[in-house]
Every structure is written in structure tokens, then in C-alpha cells.
Image (cartoon, rainbow, N blue to C red):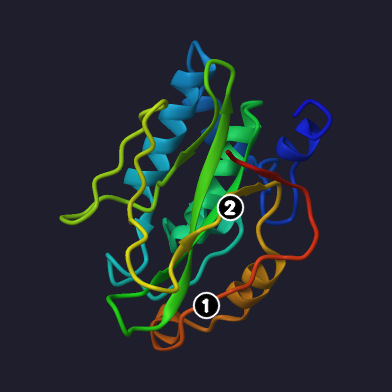
Amino acid sequence: MNALLPAFVAASDVIDFHHPDVARLARSLRADTPRATARRCFEWVRDRIEHSIDYQRDEVSCDASQALALGTGLCTAKSHLLVALLRANGLPSGFCYQRLTLRDAGSPFCTHGLVAVWLEEGGWYRCDARGNKATVHCEFTPGAENLAFPVVTPGEQLYPQVWAQPWPELVRRMRELPSIAAYCEAPIDAAPPQDGVAITLD
């Protein structure tokens, strides 16, 4: 872990935590302990950034600063903002993914994005800040994984890796989206990259 740690605290064009608005928010969410800071970042993104489909928002965000400025994003954009806030506070964090059906069995598959944060007392902890609703209730509960969606349908899967950067194909296709309506018509079902820094969870 120590050799890979710098990759999990680095900024990038997507994880732009040096953006003044992202940096300011990150400072405001800092708490007395890393765990408390991580919880505050998680809950802010979960509750304050509207999930595009849940709230019928048609704007497309990708970069962390875009999600913050627009106040909306798909799960993937929300994960970019959450990692930016965590890294701005010095907390190692990265990206995890599921392949899920968009609505139910027989519907198109989509790439669902979530986050893992490194906590000294427990190691990597996956958490899902996509936003709660009647059928989703995610909390920050290190030691007990609490994801929004179980893997139940053939073809679905939870990838075991934590990536230091978002999947390049996913980012490219998100940036090409003209609208969320277009996404709902043709969801992004991206493939994991063949390279890149990643840690495989047990």
C-alpha cells in the first residue's frame, strides 16, 4: 500500500481538488479525525448533489468541480467529487465500480460508480454516495459495507479493485454525453482498463 499511496491522493483533470470551490468545500468539511472527515464528505455529496435521474436533471457533469457547480451528477460524477473532497483532506481514496442493469432484468447494463477510502483502523472501505431514496439507504458505516445495489442479475458484478483514477473509457463517454436523457436511452456500459494503478480487495 505505501508504495502506491501517492497515486491515491493525487489530483487530475477529473479529480480537480485544487479548484477553488472544491478546495473551499473540502476545508469546511474537515473534522477532528480522518474517519469523521470522511463521513462528512460522504454525507455532503450523498445529500447535497442531486442524482441526475432521481431528480430528473438533464445537465451532464463529469469533473469534480462540474458536479459541485451544477449541484447534480450521475453516480460516477458524484464519486469524482467525493474522491476530490477526500483527497483534498489528505485521505487516500479511489474508485470502485459495479456493472448493473439500469432498471431491472432485461434492461441495458450500466457502469455504477462508488468510492473506497483508506482508514487506518480498518483499511479500504467501500461506500456509495449516489443518494438515498425509497429503495436505497446508504450510510457511512466502516466495518460494515453498505452499498446501494446488490448484484443479483446474471451479467451484473462488483469489481474487486480500487482504481487510483476513473476508468478512461467511462470518463471519455461521460464527457461526450449531450444530456442525461441520452444516457437513459443508451447507458454507459464501460469496460475496465487494461492498465492503470489499482489495488484488489480481498
Quadrant in which the N terminus is drawn: top right
Residue located at (49% from left, 11% from top): 32
**Residue 65 position in % (x across, y down):** 59, 52
**Residue 74 position in % (x across, y down):** 44, 64
Residue reaching furthest to the right: 3
Residue reaching furthest to the top: 32
Please state which of residues 164 and 47 is positioned toward the viewer in this rendering: 164
Q: Which residue is mark 1?
A: 188
**Residue 45 position in % (x across, y down):** 42, 44
Residue 190 found in image quarter = bottom right
The label on residue 72 is: none
Residue located at (62% from left, 70% from top): 170
Residue 151 found in image quarter = bottom left
How far is disc 1 from disc 2 in space, using C-alphas? 19 Å
Q: Residues within 10 Å of mark 2 (few under 14, many from 20)?
A: many
Residue located at (44% from left, 19% from top): 36
Q: Are marks 1 and 2 in contact (CB under 8 Å)?
A: no
Q: Earlier in the sequence, mark 1 or mark 2?
A: 2
> In the image, 134: left or right of 138?
left
Q: Which residue is mark 2?
A: 64
SS assignment at label 1: loop
Residue reaching furthest to the left: 134
Residue located at (53% from left, 65% from top): 61
SS assignment at label 2: helix
